[in-house]
Image (cartoon, coloured by chain):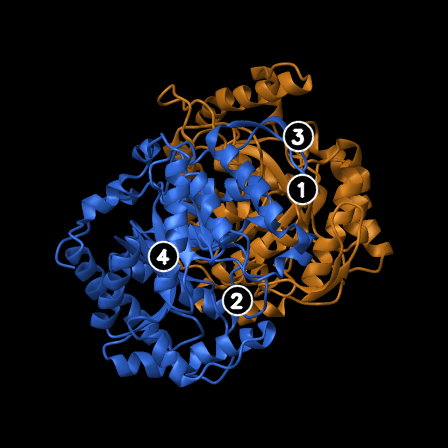
Chain colours: A orange, B blue
Amino acid sequence: MEIGIYSFGERNVDPETGQLISPAERIRRLLEEIELADQVGLDVFGVGEHHRPDYVVSAPAVVLAAAAARTRRIRLTSAVNVLSSDDPVRVFQQFATLDLISGGRAEIMVGRGSFIESFPLFGYDLRDYDALFEEKLDLLLKLRESERVTWSGRFRPPIRDRGVYPRPIQNPIPVWIAVGGTPESAVRAGRLGLPMALGIIGGIPARFRPLVELFRQAAREAGHPVPRLSINSHGFIADTSKDAADTAFPAFKEVMDRLGRERGWGPLTREQFEFSRSLHGADFVGNPEEVIEKILYQHELFHHDRFLLQLTVGTLPHKKVLRAIELLGTKVAPAVRKALGKDREDRGGRGDGGNSGGGRGRDGQKDAAAPSTAVGTPPATGR
Amino acid sequence: MEIGIYSFGERNVDPETGQLISPAERIRRLLEEIELADQVGLDVFGVGEHHRPDYVVSAPAVVLAAAAARTRRIRLTSAVNVLSSDDPVRVFQQFATLDLISGGRAEIMVGRGSFIESFPLFGYDLRDYDALFEEKLDLLLKLRESERVTWSGRFRPPIRDRGVYPRPIQNPIPVWIAVGGTPESAVRAGRLGLPMALGIIGGIPARFRPLVELFRQAAREAGHPVPRLSINSHGFIADTSKDAADTAFPAFKEVMDRLGRERGWGPLTREQFEFSRSLHGADFVGNPEEVIEKILYQHELFHHDRFLLQLTVGTLPHKKVLRAIELLGTKVAPAVRKALGKDREDRGGRGDGGNSGGGRGRDGQKDAAAPSTAVGTPPATGR
């Protein structure tokens, strides 16, 4: 199983200073987090797009390109690009460029968008929420399929036999579909043979099993090999369970209560938080052993191929975030890999991220210009 | 005077291998070129947007973000963003992100576009060539002026009191207008009080004097302090004049002849090339002394504040490109600065890139999170 982290560059009051963290400082910390994640052998780092003052990332590929220059092995993905309100041509170009910069480590994760600020900003109508995504995904997949494209749709000007450049190293560059819980979205991903990143950030994870089954069944019915599945959740890790909970709770509460005021949830209580971090709840807040146990429990449920953790649900003390990354990379990931009998080479060979056509491999990756940046390199021993 | 380099990530047949250089290799070399330019004390590196197989850069901010992570002092600019066919909101967000990543070293250079591939690709009509630019520039300037924006126009959906994030460190982030030789464009830049980057890539540079005068006069008439001027030209530098010419000629000829076939120019002769590299011609191909003499000659003509050189007009032997960068940074730039009596501190204090409002300074730059990456730091001695 691949294990990684995702972040939106959250900007909240820093508990250490009592001040709102500046955008420059948040970017500096985020890049340090990605660099450390690479150093401790994690497999993936994702950054996601928001268009609000409380998140610093609105241009994921730009942030990931800086991270690419400071890392060697870790795969770099959006998590997510709000494709519905973007131009698939620009998204493809940016991630193809990232792929070149990183030596074939780029992935694109696209979603309809959980936050909706981007729709009015870029002139889209929320009534087209799903149609926009469907159409733009169609174009994105065409762009990765061939260098020259002819395409037309409702929401973007047509393209008449134009080339789109640069071409990425990976052929095809992985495209994941992020799904929040909508059955139709899971079926769409499966039907297209695309890997699905399922966000489980509340409720009872076991209840998502039917959704995962729908996804796999749709893939089988469409004649695709079963695509990969990622589970993306909130969490925090510290050396002790109590420290993890006491550190994460105020930050989680600040963020979830603020979002709750926008969306009509009640405030988060410590009791709810404690349930959510128990084995059957959605969050991964605890010491390494608790997080390992929960990942393995969910693996029984989902048989997923990748697990991504949002560590900085709110702004947390930077040193504790770095320690959490270290624990995830050096304690949790090796134990999970060992328990599932997957070694590093196996993970290297399975990183295709799905094929829209169902048939092509990720052979392009072997063309990576800089061998030191290719994925699948065994990590240094002793980590 | 600031001295720097710009590139489009040109992809031609590599004279050393006889093979077309791969996109991954071209990006690798480009990042190495930028890193070296920083190390030898050059002031600016620009990368420009094309949408053709023979150029690797279509997403300048993504490339520059990787460069930001590998450099400390050099300013990083697009050269250019084809703003007419892009969304100013995305461009602003990408460069604001770059500004955060680089500690306040980002600049945006926008133009109407010399190449026109982007217009059909993004669904624009060339008949709107100038109106598109005018309108999108208006929005870009509003976005840097205030966090929340209300705006409407013909070519992009309206924005009703939305915030655009992240905000850059520099306030305002510099916006330069790239001008190819159109008097109306020079007047527009001056009227807006924006710095102008004048591309002189052929003909007799002295004939561009009236254009520069138009630009400055328009600024004065609009009540702006006279904005900065950059001259952007083609060239190549080697230890000997003959080596510079013999190395550059085949590459220049390949590129200019290919473009000539598209645009109806005749093939480049060695005779024309030799004239172009003489004192009164447009190209800067020669040994360091010749290039110094020509920059100073043009400074008499234009009194410009910045000079940017496109070294890789076609694909050249990589080692020779690195040597050219070294010569520009260690021989040409110090001699030009000395002759013009400008020291490094002076340049640091003049890097504002113009203000649309005519009044605001670049005070935001002092907020740079990482002091080591702020511009204006004196270079290490002994370089």
Same-subunit check for callouts 4 and 2: yes
* Residue B361, quarter of picture: top left
Numbered badge on residue A280: 3
The local secondary structure at tag 4 comes to helix
Camera-near label (3 vs 1) is 1
Q: Position of residue B231 (x, y in %)?
A: 36, 57
Camera-near label (4 vs 3) is 4
Numbered badge on residue B209: 4
Numbered badge on residue B55: 2
User: Gap between marks 4 and 1, in whole Å?
Assistant: 34 Å
- The amino acid type, in three-letter code, at marker 3 is His
Q: Is residue A125 visible?
A: yes
- The amino acid type, in three-letter code, at marker 2 is Tyr
Residue annotated with mark 1: B155
Report in which chain the residue with disc 4 lies: B
User: Gap between marks 4 and 3, in whole Å?
Assistant: 74 Å
User: Gap between marks 1 and 2, in whole Å?
Assistant: 27 Å
Q: In the rendered structure, are the residues bearing label 1 and label 2 in contact, judged by CB atoms less than 8 Å apart? A: no
User: Gap between marks 3 and 1, in whole Å?
Assistant: 51 Å
Taking the image as shown, residue A317 lies to the left or right of residue A223, namely: left
- The amino acid type, in three-letter code, at marker 1 is Phe
Q: Position of residue B309 (x, y in %)?
A: 35, 63
- Between discs 1 and 2, the one toward the N terminus: 2
Q: Residues within 10 Å of mark 1 (few under 14, many from 20)?
A: some
